[in-house]
Image (tube, rainbow, N blue to C red):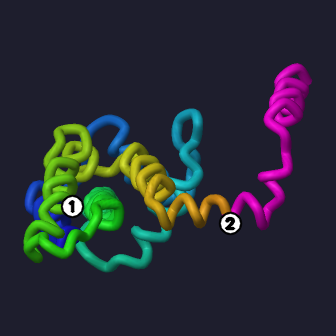
Amino acid sequence: AVFLCALALYVWTLAPGLVFGDPAEYTFVPHIWGISHPPGYAFQTVLGGLWQRIVPIGSIAYRANLLSAVAGALIAALIYGSVRMLSPDRPDDSPLARYVPGILAAASAMTATDLWQHSIHANSHIITALLATASLTPEGSEAMFEIETRSGLDRIPLRELRSAWQGTLDW
C-alpha cells in the first residue's frame, strides 16, 4: 500500500515529457546505449535502456521519468518495511499502533523535497538512493554481506585495496 501511495503521488506530479538539463541526458543516453558525462552512470544507462524498451507506456521521456517514480516509491516502501521490522510488537499495542511508525517514516520520506524532486524526472540520483536504501535495510545488508562473502571481497584487506588503487592511479 505504501508503494502504491508513493507511486500515485509521483505519477500525479511526474514530468510528462523531456526535462531540460541532465534529465534530458539521462533520458537520451540509455535510449542509444551511450555514455553519460563523467562518471558515466553505467548502471543507470543499462537499467534505463532496459526500462525504456520493456515498459510500453508513453514516450521515451515519460518512461525514463516513470523509472524514477518507481524507484522513489520503492524507497518509501523499503523505509516502511525497515521501520516496521525494527519496531517492537508489544501485546498491549493496538493493531494501528504497530503500523503508524512505518507509515509516518515512509510518508515523511516520500514527501521530503529532495526525494520527491528526484522521483518525478529522469536522473541517476534516485537510482543511487534506491540502492543505498536497499543496502541499509536488514535484508539488504544481509544480501550485501552474502555477495561480499561469495565474491571473496570480504577477504581483501582495505590497506591492500588502497595500495592497488593507488598503483592504478600512478600508472
For disc 2, the marked residue is 146
For disc 1, the marked residue is 102
Question: Residue 37 got which mark?
Answer: none
What secondary structure prevails in the magenta region?
helix
From the viewer's perspective, tell me whether residue 129 is left or right of residue 19: right
Identify the image quadrant of residue 152.
bottom right
Up the image or down, 1 lies above or below 77; here it is below
Tell me the kind of residue under disc 2: Glu
Spatial CA distance of label 1 from label 2 is 27 Å
Q: Which residues are magenta?
A: 146-171
Asked if residue 48 shows in the view, the reply is yes
From the viewer's perspective, tell me whether residue 84 is left or right of residue 40: left
**Disc 2 crowd, CA 10 A, few/some/many (<14, 14-19, 20+):** few
Rendered residue at 79%/62% (across/down): 151
Given residues 163 and 105, the one toward you in this image is 105
Which residue of the protein is positioned furthest toward the top in this rendering? 170
Up the image or down, 5 lies above or below 36; here it is below
Tell me the kind of residue under disc 1: Gly
Whichever of labels 1 and 2 marks the residue nearer the N terminus, that label is 1
Identify the image quadrant of residue 146.
bottom right
- Residue 13: horizontal and vertical position, in percent? 10, 55
Given residues 86 and 20, the one toward you in this image is 86
Rendered residue at 78%/52% (across/down): 154
